[in-house]
Image: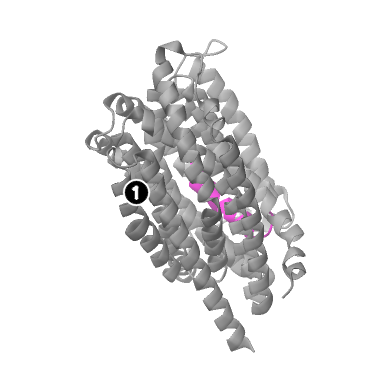
Amino acid sequence: MVLSDYTKEFQYNLKLASPVILGMLGHTFVSFVDNVMVGQLGAAELAAVSLGNSFIFIAMSIGIGFSTAITPLVAEADTEQNFTKGKSVFKHGFFLCTVLGILLFLMLLVAKPLMYVMDQPEEVVELAIPYLDLVAFSLVPLIVFQAFKQFSDGLSLTKYPMFATIVANILNVVINYVLIFGKFGFPEMGIVGAAVGTLVSRFVMLFFLWWLLAKRHKSKPYVTNIKFFKLSKQPLKKLTNLGLPSAMQMFFEVAIFTAAIWLSGLLGKNAQAANQIALNLSSMTFMVAMGLSVAAMVRVGNQKGLKDYKNLKRIAESIFLVGFVFALVFALFFAVFHQVLPDMYVDLDDLANAVDTAEVVKIAATLLLAAAVFQISDSLQVVALGALRGLQDVKIPTLITFISYWVIGFPIGYFLGKEEAYGSLGIWLGLLAGLSAAAILLFVRFNYLTKKLIRESD
């Protein structure tokens, strides 16, 4: 094949992926706004948000990962023009995500006391507990929103979740500003104000997306007149068989980044705050790869429905190529601006905390160089995962992600991340090793499966 066989798909791939990318960036922007505003309060407050969110991210990864099972099944039903199958997938996915959201919220409440035995800075834990209570409850509307979002993506209506996320972001910024700093006569609530903003905006985001889909001719029959408790065993089983491994894939990846937060906490509040800055910035670029991953999942799911495996492979590889180009741009961006970007998160005029602030910025700048290096492997691994989900291949990729992050990545990060070794940089070298291993192994898996399908169909 020549390069034009791949580049001719770029326009449609980006048209499909762009709303998803903007929507995913919206989720991250909520975190960005929280971090920037809370960072003005001090290193301890920023570290507290980091610690609280480390618990949230683990639970969220399970919920979001599980919900991705909805997209390829809806995409396949849409290609087959099978409305009954598509509505059944959505209804059962909606039910399972609702139950999962409630369970994850309850699990977080039970897990809260772990903060006291994790050897984290005491002042950070005291600030993190009330923040976690409210943000944990926001998982319920977020994961139900994910059911609607993944369904919408499966119908290739990717712009509606984006609209809902933009509205939620605007609301979150306003509430944060008013409640964190106590503006317009409201009480000054600090990081708890940030948690209130997150909770309210996520409920608004959910109901606004439902309203948008209920107005659209193509999606209205799916999202109205839902017999919520009239369930069938087969769709529940199908979604669970796809959703649980997908949840574990995302869990294994997010958990290693969460482990990086906890390991940073062992190095002190400044290292933890710096880790949060680098993590927040690199998670924004990751959302571009996540959007391309959804595009890969939808397009591969469509081609699977048509049983056109040669085009399936070509289209997926064209998305890998787009991801590589974006990753290269982001890598250069981080490398060039690694010393400037951390300044956004701190108050440089705060003389009382000037020493801590300088150390936070210095560590974060070093970590952004590591983030620059792993942009390419991070992009390839998540896009390959999306393509494999489109093929409904989830069990072997789950094993691959576990080996990559926890057999390879975590031990390297743990040993190199000790204070007497490389400290924070060592932790991120472990992340780099895990992501690179996942990228190589998942790409090999996709290549093997598609070649096998092409041979069998000839």
Q: Position of residue 203 (x, y in %)?
A: 54, 37
Nearest the eye: 382 or 432? 432
* Quarter of the rendering occupied by the C terminus: bottom right
Q: Considering only vertical position in the picture, is 307 above or below 197?
A: below
Tell me, yes or no, whether the highlighted magenta stretch contains residue 232: no
Tell me, yes or no, whether the highlighted magenta stretch contains residue 147: yes
Q: Residues within 10 Å of mark 1 (few under 14, many from 20)?
A: many
Nearest the eye: 280 or 366? 366
Mark 1 residue type: Gly
The answer to whether 58 appears left or right of 76 in the picture is: left
* Quarter of the rendering occupied by the N terminus: bottom right
User: Extreme left residue here?
Assistant: 117
Secondary structure mostly seen in the magenta stretch = helix
Q: Position of residue 405 (x, y in %)?
A: 38, 57
Q: Residue at x 53, y 58 (%)?
A: 382
The answer to whether 332 appears left or right of 188 in the picture is: right
Q: Position of residue 94 (x, y in %)?
A: 52, 55
Q: Residue at x 59, y 87 (%)?
A: 455
Tell me the residue that label 1 is attached to.
413
Magenta stretch in the rendered image? 141-158
Q: Considering only vertical position in the picture, is 247 above or below 333?
A: below
Q: Residue at x 55, y 59 (%)?
A: 380
Q: Is residue 133 visible?
A: no
Q: Residue at x 53, y 77 (%)?
A: 449
The residue tagged with tag 1: helix, strand or loop? Answer: helix
Q: Considering only vertical position in the picture, is 327 above or below 126?
A: below
Q: Quadrant of residue 109?
A: top left
